[in-house]
Image (cartoon, rainbow, N blue to C red):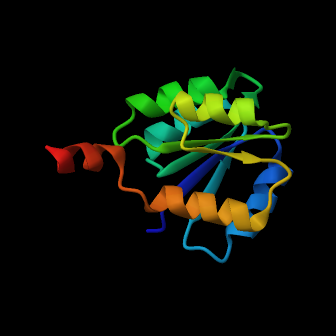
């Protein structure tokens, strides 16, 4: 099965664009519109990466990060924002996000970041390997 990426955004056109950008890669992209649907989806399946808008209709990227931390294996969280600046990028990384992808999306950057995140060992496996 292809590594899974779950994109949390209320903008279905962004999910369609991202899906086209990722089509050359061996990644499976799914889309949910908000935090509530993310929580429900995470009960059905695990994902290697959660890509989330910084602000959702019913939460923020911080709520997504908190949810990811309690999941086993814990997915990487990547944040996307239209007006991403160095301060926000630094905050996201310092609080535990894997990376930040600014919008509008650049195909090569999206592919590079998501490929790298999906190829990392799951956090549960990384901890077990160091013991």
- Camera-nearest residue between 79 and 7: 79
Side (left or right) of 130 relative to 104: left
Q: Is residue 105 visible?
A: yes
Quadrant containing the N terminus is: bottom left
- Outermost residue toward the left? 131
- Camera-nearest residue between 14 and 119: 119
Query: In the picture shown, does residue 64 fall above or below 107?
Result: above
Q: What residue is shown at x 81% (from left), y 52% (from top)?
A: 14
Q: What residue is shown at x 68% (from left), y 68% (from top)?
A: 22
Q: Quadrant of residue 18?
A: bottom right
Side (left or right) of 124 relative to 20: left
Query: In the picture shown, does residue 92 fall above or below 30?
Result: above
- Outermost residue toward the bottom? 24
Q: What residue is shown at x 67% (from left), y 49% (from top)?
A: 31
Query: In the picture shown, does residue 47 fall above or below 108?
Result: above
Q: Position of residue 100 (x, y in %)?
A: 67, 44
Quadrant containing the C terminus is: top left
- Camera-nearest residue between 40 and 91: 91
Q: Is residue 36 visible?
A: no
Q: Position of residue 42 (x, y in %)?
A: 49, 39
Query: In the picture shown, does residue 18 fall above or below 70?
Result: below
Q: Position of residue 96 (x, y in %)?
A: 50, 33
Q: Position of residue 74 (x, y in %)?
A: 40, 40
Q: What residue is shown at x 63% (from left), y 28% (from top)?
A: 91
């Amino acid at each position: 099965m292809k590594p899974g990426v779950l994109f949390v955004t209320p903008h279905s056109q962004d999910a369609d664009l991202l899906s086209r950008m990722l089509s050359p890669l061996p990644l499976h992209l799914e889309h949910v519109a908000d935090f509530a649907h993310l929580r429900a989806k995470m009960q059905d399946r695990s994902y290697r990466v959660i890509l989330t808008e910084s602000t959702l209709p019913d939460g923020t990227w911080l709520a997504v990060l908190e949810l990811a931390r309690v999941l086993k294996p814990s997915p990487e969280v990547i944040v996307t924002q239209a007006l991403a600046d160095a301060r926000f990028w630094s905050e996201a990384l310092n609080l535990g996000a894997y990376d930040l992808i600014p919008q509008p999306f650049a195909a090569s950057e999206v592919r590079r970041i998501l490929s790298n995140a999906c190829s990392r060992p799951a956090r549960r496996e990384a901890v077990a390997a160091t013991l």
